[in-house]
Amino acid sequence: MTATELEKWLKTDESRRAGQHKDGGESVGHESGRRIVTMLRTKKAELSEKDEQHMRKVVGYVHRHLAQRPSGDVENTTWRYSLMNWGHDPCK
């Protein structure tokens, strides 16, 4: 997803409801999505080692969850919404 697409998605109710929530607060994926937006808008040369580590975490999350794809239409599933919070839309 582009930074603009992800930023728009993160403002939706579906995005806020998806994923594991810490003590009833923001989900891990939603927080990650906000960080991804910032990184996508940052020049590559200005990204830190911590940014690189976070993107490795993102790639690992997306890879694991794609392997758990449910059967049938996934367009309106929490599985898809969770992946979208991490910057990947499996329907694209």
Image: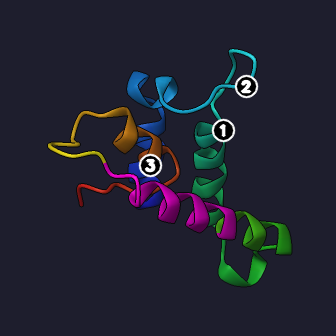
- Amino acid type at image mark 2: Lys
Which residue occupies 45% across, 31% down? 15
Is 66 magenta? The answer is yes
63 left or right of 46?
left
Q: Determine which of the numbered discs, if any, sits on residue 54 in the image.
A: none
Q: Is residue 40 visible?
A: no
How far apart are the alpha carbons under marks 1 and 2?
Answer: 7 Å
Q: Quadrant of residue 50?
A: bottom right
* Closest to the observer, 43 or 73: 73
Q: Which residues are magenta?
A: 56-69
Residue placed under numbered mark 1 in the picture: 28
Where residue 80 sits in the image (x, y, percent)?
35, 44
- The first of marks 1 and 2 along the sequence is 2
Q: Tell me which secondary structure the magenta stretch mostly adopts.
A: helix
* Circles 3 and 2 in contact, beta carbons < 8 Å: no
Q: Residues within 10 Å of mark 3 (few under 14, many from 20)?
A: many
* Circles 1 and 2 in contact, beta carbons < 8 Å: yes
Q: Determine which of the numbered discs, if any, sits on residue 22 in the image.
A: 2
Q: Quadrant of residue 23?
A: top right
57 left or right of 85?
right
Above/below status of 21 relative to 70: above
Residue placed under numbered mark 3 in the picture: 83
- The first of marks 3 and 2 along the sequence is 2
* Circle 3 SS class: helix
Where residue 1 sits in the image (x, y, percent)?
39, 60
Above/below status of 63 relative to 30: below
Which residue occupies 30% across, 34% down? 77
Which residue occupies 23% across, 55% down? 91
Residue occupying the far bottom of the picture: 45
Which residue occupies 44% across, 49% down? 83
* Closest to the observer, 64 or 10: 64
* Circle 1 SS class: helix
